[in-house]
Amino acid sequence: EKSLANIRNQIEQIQSGIAMKNDEMGTELIDQLTLEERDLLSRLNPEITRLKEKFLSCKNSRIEIETRKEELENNLSTNLMRRQKELEAIISSADSKTLPVEVEAKEQELKESKRTLDEATTVLKANVDAINAHTRQMEQLKKQRDDLKALEANLEQTVQDGAKDLEQLMSSRSTYLVKQDECMKKIRDLGSLPADAFET
């Protein structure tokens, strides 16, 4: 009788465990994510694609500006050398009256060339800053996506573990039910207890 009582207690514990696992297994994987995580997961891939396109656009713009800057620097260097030679020629050939006017005109041309170069440098720096900002944003979005994928993998593993535990519990329950039936049959054969004493 003590053995039958132990078996019955074990069966009740198994049934309780099965009920808990069934409750856990009834929850969809996506339901275990917060609304914010689900919304972020749905927006990550399009956002990363958009940023990649913007990054490529900025990169191409940067290449064009760097090329333009190099051209301007080369032109400025060439112009400076040429203007220097021109000024030297003017100084050697011009009289004292026309010299100040010629020098002032050449200096103004040099100022314009330098101003153009400064503007190109400013535009280039702005593009570089924009590219760096977009790169950081893309890295953050990729990290968030990777974190969500890791969370999804962990949740999937939890579901698989729960299914395995449930399968083991069902197997144990079947074993105990067989033992219970055998014990109840023996007891009925002995006639010591009524036939429905341990029916569930």
Image (spheres, grey):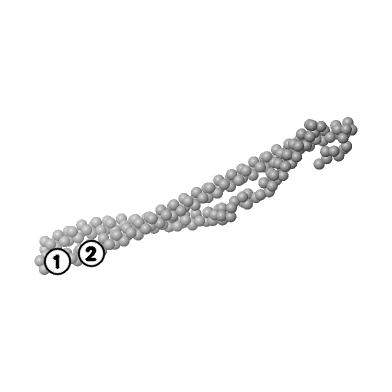
Element under label 2? helix
Indicate the quadrant where residue 118 lies: bottom left
Element under label 1? helix
N-term mark: 2 or 1: 1
Left or right: 191 in relation to 121: right
Left or right: 37 in relation to 200: left
Residue 110: percent from the left, percent from the top?
23, 62
Give the camera-side residue of 94 and 178. 178
Residue 98: percent from the left, percent from the top?
13, 68
Q: Please tell me which residue is depicted at 74% across the width and 36% down the height of the picture.
A: 10
Name the amino acid, label 1. Pro
Left or right: 30 in relation to 94: right
Q: Which residue is mark 1?
A: 100
Residue at the front extreme of this rendering: 2
Indicate the quadrant where residue 150 lies: top right
Give the camera-side residue of 132 and 80. 132
